[in-house]
Amino acid sequence: MESKQLTDRERLTLAQAAQNVIGKIVSTKDPDSLRSKVDDEMLALYEDTGAKSFDLKLCNMKVGTYSVRVSKPIHRIDLVVNDREKLSRWCADNGLAETETTYEIDLDGVTLDVVQETAFNMLLDTGIIRKREVVHMTDIVLHDVKQYFANTGEVPDGCKTVAVDEQERPLGTTLKVDPLLVAKAMGEDLPGAVVGLLAEGGDAR
Protein backbone atom coordinates (compact mmCIF):
# COMPACT_ATOMS: atom_id res chain seq x y z
CA MET A 1 0.00 0.00 0.00
CA GLU A 2 1.41 3.35 -1.05
CA SER A 3 1.83 5.78 1.85
CA LYS A 4 -0.14 9.00 1.72
CA GLN A 5 1.82 12.20 1.14
CA LEU A 6 0.91 14.55 3.98
CA THR A 7 0.55 18.29 3.61
CA ASP A 8 2.48 20.63 5.88
CA ARG A 9 -0.67 21.28 7.87
CA GLU A 10 -1.29 17.57 8.33
CA ARG A 11 2.31 16.95 9.32
CA LEU A 12 2.07 19.74 11.90
CA THR A 13 -1.18 18.29 13.26
CA LEU A 14 0.42 14.87 13.56
CA ALA A 15 3.50 16.31 15.27
CA GLN A 16 1.38 18.31 17.72
CA ALA A 17 -0.67 15.21 18.60
CA ALA A 18 2.53 13.26 19.21
CA GLN A 19 3.99 16.06 21.30
CA ASN A 20 0.88 16.31 23.47
CA VAL A 21 1.06 12.63 24.37
CA ILE A 22 4.82 12.09 24.40
CA GLY A 23 5.39 15.29 26.38
CA LYS A 24 3.39 13.80 29.25
CA ILE A 25 5.23 10.50 29.02
CA VAL A 26 8.75 11.99 29.11
CA SER A 27 8.00 14.81 31.56
CA THR A 28 10.59 15.13 34.35
CA LYS A 29 8.26 17.41 36.35
CA ASP A 30 5.31 15.04 36.65
CA PRO A 31 6.01 12.47 39.40
CA ASP A 32 3.46 10.12 37.81
CA SER A 33 5.01 10.16 34.31
CA LEU A 34 6.70 7.14 32.76
CA ARG A 35 9.99 9.06 32.76
CA SER A 36 9.74 9.67 36.51
CA LYS A 37 8.96 6.00 37.12
CA VAL A 38 12.00 4.81 35.16
CA ASP A 39 14.11 7.57 36.74
CA ASP A 40 13.29 6.11 40.16
CA GLU A 41 14.40 2.67 38.92
CA MET A 42 17.69 4.05 37.56
CA LEU A 43 18.42 5.99 40.74
CA ALA A 44 17.71 2.88 42.82
CA LEU A 45 20.19 0.91 40.67
CA TYR A 46 22.76 3.65 41.19
CA GLU A 47 22.27 3.51 44.96
CA ASP A 48 22.58 -0.29 44.95
CA THR A 49 25.42 -0.77 42.46
CA GLY A 50 27.07 2.63 41.90
CA ALA A 51 26.46 2.30 38.14
CA LYS A 52 25.87 5.66 36.44
CA SER A 53 25.20 4.74 32.81
CA PHE A 54 22.92 2.17 31.24
CA ASP A 55 22.41 1.13 27.61
CA LEU A 56 18.96 1.63 26.12
CA LYS A 57 18.04 -1.21 23.77
CA LEU A 58 15.20 -2.00 21.42
CA CYS A 59 15.08 -5.46 19.84
CA ASN A 60 18.59 -6.15 21.21
CA MET A 61 20.02 -3.08 19.48
CA LYS A 62 21.54 -0.21 21.44
CA VAL A 63 19.68 2.99 20.58
CA GLY A 64 20.77 5.31 23.37
CA THR A 65 21.94 5.73 26.95
CA TYR A 66 20.33 6.46 30.30
CA SER A 67 22.75 8.23 32.64
CA VAL A 68 22.62 9.30 36.27
CA ARG A 69 24.04 12.79 36.88
CA VAL A 70 25.92 13.12 40.15
CA SER A 71 27.53 15.95 42.08
CA LYS A 72 31.28 16.12 42.52
CA PRO A 73 32.63 14.91 45.88
CA ILE A 74 33.65 17.76 48.16
CA HIS A 75 36.72 17.52 50.40
CA ARG A 76 37.87 20.83 51.84
CA ILE A 77 38.63 22.76 55.01
CA ASP A 78 36.29 25.67 55.73
CA LEU A 79 36.79 28.62 58.04
CA VAL A 80 33.96 29.51 60.43
CA VAL A 81 33.60 32.35 62.94
CA ASN A 82 33.18 31.29 66.58
CA ASP A 83 34.02 34.60 68.31
CA ARG A 84 33.02 37.67 66.30
CA GLU A 85 34.51 40.14 68.81
CA LYS A 86 37.96 38.52 68.64
CA LEU A 87 37.77 38.39 64.87
CA SER A 88 36.79 42.07 64.75
CA ARG A 89 39.87 43.04 66.72
CA TRP A 90 42.07 40.82 64.56
CA CYS A 91 40.67 42.39 61.38
CA ALA A 92 41.29 45.89 62.73
CA ASP A 93 44.86 45.02 63.73
CA ASN A 94 45.61 43.48 60.34
CA GLY A 95 44.05 46.19 58.20
CA LEU A 96 41.18 44.10 56.87
CA ALA A 97 38.41 46.22 58.41
CA GLU A 98 37.78 49.91 58.98
CA THR A 99 37.58 51.14 62.57
CA GLU A 100 35.34 54.05 63.57
CA THR A 101 36.01 55.84 66.86
CA THR A 102 32.99 57.17 68.79
CA TYR A 103 32.61 58.71 72.25
CA GLU A 104 29.92 58.08 74.85
CA ILE A 105 29.14 60.58 77.62
CA ASP A 106 28.47 58.84 80.90
CA LEU A 107 26.52 61.71 82.50
CA ASP A 108 22.73 61.74 82.33
CA GLY A 109 21.07 64.94 81.14
CA VAL A 110 24.27 66.81 80.29
CA THR A 111 24.80 68.29 76.85
CA LEU A 112 28.27 69.54 75.94
CA ASP A 113 28.20 71.99 73.04
CA VAL A 114 31.91 72.83 73.06
CA VAL A 115 34.61 70.92 74.88
CA GLN A 116 38.18 72.09 74.71
CA GLU A 117 40.79 69.44 74.10
CA THR A 118 42.22 69.62 77.65
CA ALA A 119 38.81 69.35 79.27
CA PHE A 120 37.84 66.61 76.88
CA ASN A 121 40.92 64.56 77.69
CA MET A 122 40.32 65.09 81.40
CA LEU A 123 36.76 63.82 81.10
CA LEU A 124 38.05 60.96 79.02
CA ASP A 125 40.57 60.06 81.72
CA THR A 126 37.94 60.13 84.45
CA GLY A 127 35.65 57.84 82.52
CA ILE A 128 32.82 60.36 82.20
CA ILE A 129 33.44 60.20 78.48
CA ARG A 130 34.24 56.75 77.15
CA LYS A 131 36.05 56.03 73.92
CA ARG A 132 34.59 53.25 71.83
CA GLU A 133 36.02 51.76 68.66
CA VAL A 134 33.60 50.07 66.28
CA VAL A 135 34.94 47.64 63.69
CA HIS A 136 32.77 47.41 60.58
CA MET A 137 32.50 43.69 59.86
CA THR A 138 30.86 43.53 56.44
CA ASP A 139 30.39 40.57 54.09
CA ILE A 140 33.33 41.89 52.10
CA VAL A 141 35.53 41.81 55.21
CA LEU A 142 34.47 38.23 55.99
CA HIS A 143 35.24 37.28 52.39
CA ASP A 144 38.69 38.84 52.76
CA VAL A 145 39.25 36.90 55.99
CA LYS A 146 38.48 33.61 54.22
CA GLN A 147 40.70 34.62 51.32
CA TYR A 148 43.51 35.41 53.78
CA PHE A 149 43.12 31.93 55.29
CA ALA A 150 43.11 30.32 51.84
CA ASN A 151 46.29 32.15 50.84
CA THR A 152 48.28 31.78 54.07
CA GLY A 153 46.77 28.87 55.98
CA GLU A 154 46.78 31.05 59.12
CA VAL A 155 43.61 30.83 61.21
CA PRO A 156 42.59 34.35 62.35
CA ASP A 157 41.63 34.98 65.97
CA GLY A 158 37.99 34.24 66.62
CA CYS A 159 37.84 31.57 63.91
CA LYS A 160 38.18 27.82 63.71
CA THR A 161 38.44 25.29 60.89
CA VAL A 162 35.93 22.57 60.05
CA ALA A 163 36.33 19.71 57.60
CA VAL A 164 33.71 19.52 54.84
CA ASP A 165 33.42 16.02 53.40
CA GLU A 166 30.51 15.33 51.06
CA GLN A 167 30.24 12.25 48.91
CA GLU A 168 28.80 12.41 45.41
CA ARG A 169 25.02 12.36 45.27
CA PRO A 170 22.53 11.91 42.42
CA LEU A 171 21.21 15.11 40.85
CA GLY A 172 18.94 13.60 38.20
CA THR A 173 19.15 11.65 34.97
CA THR A 174 19.97 12.28 31.32
CA LEU A 175 18.22 10.36 28.55
CA LYS A 176 19.79 10.23 25.07
CA VAL A 177 18.06 8.35 22.25
CA ASP A 178 19.01 8.23 18.55
CA PRO A 179 15.78 8.40 16.46
CA LEU A 180 17.41 6.78 13.41
CA LEU A 181 18.64 3.83 15.48
CA VAL A 182 15.15 3.48 16.99
CA ALA A 183 13.63 3.35 13.50
CA LYS A 184 16.21 0.79 12.39
CA ALA A 185 15.73 -1.38 15.47
CA MET A 186 11.94 -1.40 15.29
CA GLY A 187 11.70 -1.75 11.52
CA GLU A 188 8.18 -2.51 10.32
CA ASP A 189 6.93 -2.61 13.91
CA LEU A 190 7.62 1.10 14.42
CA PRO A 191 4.32 2.51 13.02
CA GLY A 192 2.23 0.14 15.13
CA ALA A 193 4.27 0.92 18.23
CA VAL A 194 3.82 4.66 17.71
CA VAL A 195 0.07 4.27 17.15
CA GLY A 196 -0.17 2.23 20.34
CA LEU A 197 1.81 4.84 22.27
CA LEU A 198 -0.42 7.66 21.04
CA ALA A 199 -3.61 5.73 21.74
CA GLU A 200 -2.47 4.75 25.23
CA GLY A 201 -1.56 8.29 26.19
CA GLY A 202 -4.46 10.05 24.49
CA ASP A 203 -7.63 11.40 26.07
CA ALA A 204 -10.11 9.64 23.82
CA ARG A 205 -13.76 10.24 24.71
Image (cartoon, rainbow, N blue to C red):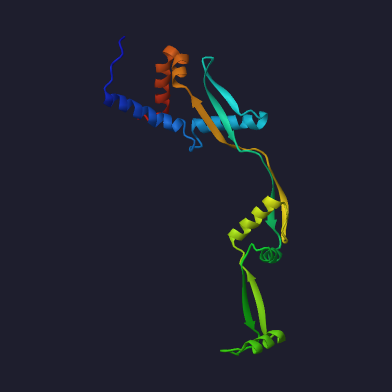
Q: Position of residue 123 (x, y in %)?
A: 67, 87
Q: Position of residue 63 (x, y in %)?
A: 50, 20
Q: Position of residue 13 (x, y in %)?
A: 31, 27
Q: Quadrant of residue 67?
A: top right
Q: Is residue 198 left or right of residue 57?
A: left
Locate the C terminus and report the quarter of the image it occupies: top left
Above or below for 134 versus 7:
below
Above or below for 82 versus 194:
below
Above or below for 47 versus 115:
above
Above or below for 185 versus 26:
above
Locate the N terminus and report the quarter of the image it occupies: top left
- Pick the front one: 83 or 142: 142
Residue at figure coordinates x 69%, y 88% from the top left:
122
Extreme-top residue of the structure: 1
Q: Is residue 67 left or right of residue 128?
A: left
Q: Position of residue 180 (x, y in %)?
A: 44, 18
Instruction: State the count of labels.
Output: 0
- Pick the front one: 35 or 199: 35
Q: Quadrant of residue 101?
A: bottom right
- Pick the front one: 166 or 23: 166
